[in-house]
Amino acid sequence: MSTPKIHLYALTGACSVAPHILLHESGLDFTTTIYKKEELIKNGGYPDELKKLNPKAKVPVATFDNEVVTENPAIFTYISQLAPSKKFFGNTPLETVRVYEWLNYLSGTLHSAAYGMFYRPQRFVDVEDGSLDKHVLAKAKMTIQDIYKFIDQKLEGKEWAVGQNFTAVDAYLYVFYRWGAGPVQLDMEKEYPNYARIAKAVEERPSAQAVLKAEGLN
Ligand SMILES: N[C@@H](CCC(=O)N[C@@H](CS)C(=O)NCC(=O)O)C(=O)O
């Protein structure tokens, strides 16, 4: 497979941190457009450039030559296929299954459902009411904590989430670890030590350090 020209559209500190890390890990050439949260707030959302590429108006978006790919698990899959020696989807068929099992859970349950409630209560209740969104936020925080507890138990005794090596799952887990420690204000290290160990191991990698620097997060 010849290597396409790759461009990643990301938002500082958002879930796009994960494909950004994978691209650095892959050794592939790529360029980025990194939006800043303050710009988005000021401009009322993503610029037309992004919305034209992704009518869902979300990042990450990755272009591979003329192909526009959205949704983290799909972008991870393409990056992995372009850098097969990196084994971002595991070393065996069963490890690949485990990677997809994790990615579905993190994308569908943790990100969309729990963080959807936390960041976007208006998707669930009429926030203009002024009282309902507080309940949604409280429930979101409890749900996030339940999920983190489950994740922490699954990571007990493990160096990486799947198999013996770094995979796309670890990069994705790192995103939600940062959100737990940041916006949700949880004591991640104390409450979720297994999760903390893996997040730290990801953060120490040159790929994550490069992303933190590029996104102005360090
Ligand atoms: N299911 C999508 C979710 C993408 C997503 O929610 N991206 C967030 C940033 S973490 C976003 O751009 N949100 C903008 C908004 O909700 O207005 C994926 O996994 O790629």
Image (spheres, rainbow, N blue to C red):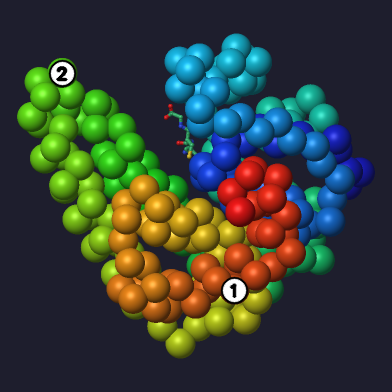
Instruction: Check disc 1 and report the residue beneath it.
Output: 201
Classify 188 as above or below 141: below
Residue in the image at 11% along x and 40% along y? 135
- Identity of the amino acid at label 1? Ala
- Answer yes or no: is residue 60 visible: no
Left or right, 132 with respect to 40, comes to left
Residue 23's tag is none
Query: In the structure shown, which secondary structural element does the residue marked by tag 1 occupy?
Result: helix
- Where residue 171 appears, x then y in whole percent? 58, 59
In front: 131, or 98?
A: 131
- Answer yes or no: is residue 124 visible: yes
Left or right, 169 with respect to 207, comes to left
Left or right, 106 with respect to 172, comes to left
- Where residue 127 appears, x then y in whole percent? 17, 24
Query: In the structure shown, which secondary structural element does the residue marked by tag 2 occupy?
Result: helix
Identify the image quadrant of residue 52: top right
Identify the image quadrant of residue 120: top left
Identify the image quadrant of residue 121: top left
- Identity of the amino acid at label 2? Glu
The answer to the question of whether label 1 and label 2 lie on touching residues, with beta carbons closer than 8 A, is: no
Residue in the image at 10% along x and 20% along y? 129
Residue found at the far right of this picture: 2
- Where residue 99 appears, x then y in whole percent? 54, 63
Instruction: Check disc 2 and report the residue beneath it.
Output: 128
Mark 2 closeness class: few <14, some 14–19, many ≥20 residues within 10 Å: few
Residue in the image at 61% along x and 54% along y? 218
- Where residue 208 appears, x then y in whole percent? 66, 59
